[in-house]
Image (spheres, coloured by chain):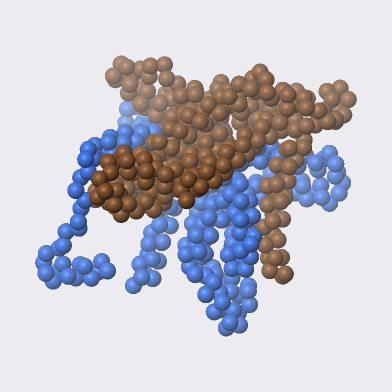
Chain colours: A brown, B blue
Amino acid sequence: MLVVLGALPFFLYVGVFLLLPIGVLAVEAFRATDPVTFEESWSTASIQAITEGPYRRAYVGSLQLSVITAVLGTVLGLALAIAVLRAKRGRLLRRMVLTASGVLANFGGIPLAFAFLAAIGSQGVVTALLTDTLGLGLGGFSLASMTGLALVYLYFLIPLMVLTIIPALEALRPQWREAADNLGASGWQYWRHVGGPVLAPPVIGAAMLLFASAFAAYATAKALVGSSVPLVTLQIADALSSNVVVGAENLGKALALGMVVIIGLVMVFYAWVQRRTQRWLS
Amino acid sequence: MTALAEGVAGAGGVAPTTPVRPGRRGAGGWRYVVLAILGLYFLVPIAASVWFTIRDRGRGTLTARYYTGIPGAEGFAEAFTRSLVLAVLTVVLALLLMVPTVVLVNLRLPRLRITVEVLTLMPLVLPPIALVVGVRSVLSWAPDYFLNTPLAEAFFAIQEPSLPWILVFVYVVLALPFVYRALDAGVRGADLRTLTEAARNLGASWPRVLVSVVLPVLRTSVLNAAFLTFALVLGEFTIANILGYETFPMWILRIGGSLPQLSVAVSVLSLLITWALLLLISALDRRRGAKESS
């Protein structure tokens, strides 16, 4: 009995600093403040407001950006991981890529935004090289756009993919490939019937993780685009920092709750896929 | 094993060649393409940042003044110190909370394992901005509902701008997934059960077991967890921005408008520091591994 007490601090801490704030969010998103009397009441006004107009656009923008970057990050990260693991004399290369991935997966936020500004921002080194020296220009490309953000997000999403998927790839035994080869399977058949099914659950899991981090990314977007690209995170920050509009605070809570609900749905879908693939494998 | 192989090769003078798989049908080319393109993609922004900060635009020469100017820059010392203090406090609190929990869950309370795992992994997918909006709502209870009570005093105390404990508390939540996974891997890899049972049989108390058995065994995992947490806090922007404290990343963004070279120089340095820390940890790791296997 006394042992259970030992785990109490953890549950208390998580209760107060993780579950309570989310719970409060779920309740207070349904509160509204009267602009004249400042009285509070129950209302679905904020929830309704976030499904239309600029807020709806922000959700769509965030979802588009996160799905595209998650898919690209998954594919490119997987390709990089396979290329590194299969390289001959690859031990040094593998260690370099793994260390670099560890560093770059943590290299998000503000410093990353500035590194890209220094490269292909309006004053950037690569921009200058392309326009002044080669006379090519960037072809209308701007960092402050969806494409620009996707390019920057991939910089930490690909390393994140490499880090999460390498253990799964290493668990893929060479003997399986050899057995398939000896039985006359083609490369495609091996991936279709052996490698693919074994790798599917971890790859889908990693893709969900990539989606979640792209969806939640705020610092990079804030530093690069201000608010010219519609993204939920930017809208939330705007709503919270506005002291003018009464009820903006509640709007921020409703927007944040929307993000939690979307992530929750993604997690439910993920659990369902995991269960299905498990049944398929067994 | 390797030592043996080297010995044989040395004696015989002929090193047995490692069997290399013959190239598969159509194997190979795409790997080098992937490596080259992605290598370029990852190197260009870093190289460009370095070039951006060491070139003197007016005279066309190289300069180090953007780097030497960092310590004296307005607001740098204050913001950087604040982030360092927050990082150290977060590391300490996260370890104090998680080391006993992970050990307990692994050794004594396996039934709680799933619950603890789910709770610690939640912050990995939960958007920090949603969490901080909730935290802000809770904090606003103090002036709204509990004014002039000790609870309100406590609420105001943790929001003190000189040392915002509230940031530490939220950062510990954000660090939970990394700390838990690092520690859990360490506990599982070390056969801690046998060791603690031995210590218990010899009469050691649980706190004693924690300090003299668990911590030394988990040294690498603790270091790993500490490093990840440290890097996370130094780079964290969302929470600090929404709650309105000027931490290190907030400062970089603020000076970026007027002094772009300086902010890029700081970004390059922070990347290098992270790199150095990670290399240091993996070096420690390897040295320990080598010592134990010999």
Residue A229 versus residue B82: which sits nearer the camera?
Answer: A229
Q: Is residue B285 above or below residue B56?
A: below
Q: x, y percentage for residue A158?
A: 42, 38
| Corner quadrant of residue A35 | top right
Is A227 or A54 nearer to us in this picture?
A: A54
Measured as percent of width and height from the top left, residue A23 is found at 73, 42
Q: Residue at x 59, y 79 (%)?
A: B200
Tell whether B95 sits left or right of B47. right
Question: Which of the image's four quarters has the C terminus of chain B?
Answer: bottom left
Name, please, the residue furthest toward the bottom: B202
Q: Residue furthest left?
A: B13
Q: Is residue B127 left or right of residue A131?
A: right
Q: Is residue B114 visible?
A: yes
Residue at 39% from the left image edge and 53% from the top image edge: A171
Q: Which quadrant: the N terminus of chain B? A: bottom left
Residue A216 versus residue B164: which sits nearer the camera?
Answer: A216
- The residue nearer to you, when weighing B128 against A168, is A168
When the figure is inspected, residue A64 is found, relative to residue B146, above or below; the finding is above
Residue at 38% of width from left, 71% of height from top?
B292
Question: Residue B5 location, x and y as percent?
Answer: 21, 67
The answer to whether residue B66 is visible is no
The residue located at (82%, 40%) in the rendering is: B143
